[in-house]
Structures are given as C-alpha cells and as structure tokens.
Image (tube, rainbow, N blue to C red):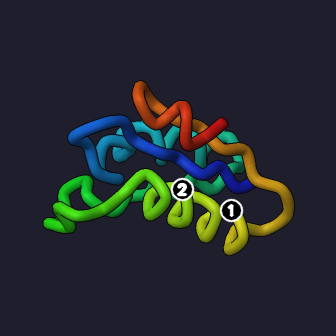
C-alpha cells in the first residue's frame, strides 16, 4: 500500500527518513512530500498550492493510498 506522508510546518520530506524503512519492512511504500514553501524557497506558496501538491501525490499513488499528516499538515491530510 502507498502511504503519502506530509510533514508539518518548517519540515520537508526528509522528516520521514526514519519512518520509510519501517514502512517498507511492513510491505508499504512511503511517499514523503516536501510541500511548496517548506524548504524549497517558495516564499509565496499558499495553502491551495500545498493542497494541490497533496492531491497530486494521491493521484500519482497506486490504488487508494493512506494520507498521513504530521502536526499542522494534518489539515492537508484530512
């Protein structure tokens, strides 16, 4: 199963580095996201930009992925 992983404020996709091997060991594929405006230098990124990035990751995943949000990103995951 694919699991889209969305890190909270001030974090990028590398926040999930320790989680990825654990998910893989359980037979899942973690898809860590770096949201627009979170470490990519895009200071004008909006919530809509971030929501679009999550939707794109969900659309690109195989089947129906789980979406996990950490901290403030839980609103995007929801």
Judging depth in this view, the residue of 18 and 38 nearest the camera is 38
Secondary structure of the residue carrying numbered label 1: helix
Mark 2 nearby-residue class (10 Å; few <14, some 14–19, many ≥20): some
- Residue sitting farthest toward the right: 63
At a point 23% along the width and 64% down the height, the residue shown is 44
Q: Give coordinates of residue 48: x percent, y percent.
A: 49, 58
- Residue sitting farthest toward the top: 71
The answer for how far apart the CA atoms under marks 2 and 1 are is 11 Å
Q: Give coordinates of residue 75: x percent, y percent.
A: 55, 34
How many numbered dots are placed on residues in this image? 2
Q: Is residue 11 left or right of residue 66?
A: left
Secondary structure of the residue carrying numbered label 2: helix
Q: Are marks 2 and 1 in contact (CB under 8 Å)?
A: no
At a point 41% along the width and 30% down the height, the residue shown is 72
Classify residue 49 by image quadrant.
bottom left
In the rendered structure, which disc, 2 or 1, sits on the residue that comes first in sequence? Answer: 2
Where's the C terminus, which quadrant? top right
Rendered view: 44 above or below 38: below
Classify residue 42 by image quadrant.
bottom left
Residue 58 has which mark?
A: 1
Mark 1 nearby-residue class (10 Å; few <14, some 14–19, many ≥20): some
Q: Is residue 27 left or right of residue 70?
A: right
Q: Give coordinates of residue 36: x percent, y percent.
A: 33, 63
- Residue sitting farthest toward the bottom: 60
Which residue position is annotated with label 2? Answer: 51
Classify residue 15 by image quadrant.
top left
Q: Give coordinates of residue 34: x percent, y percent.
A: 36, 58
Residue 36 has which mark?
A: none
Tag nearer the camera, 2 or 1? 2
At a point 68% along the width and 62% down the height, the residue shown is 58
């Amino acid at each position: 199963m694919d699991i889209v992983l969305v890190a909270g404020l001030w974090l990028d996709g590398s926040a999930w580095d320790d989680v990825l091997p654990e998910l893989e060991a359980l037979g899942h594929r973690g898809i860590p996201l770096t949201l627009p405006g979170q470490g990519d230098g895009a200071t004008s990124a909006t919530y809509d930009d971030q929501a679009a990035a999550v939707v794109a990751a969900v659309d690109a995943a195989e089947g129906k992925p789980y979406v996990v949000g950490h901290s403030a990103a839980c609103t995007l995951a929801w």
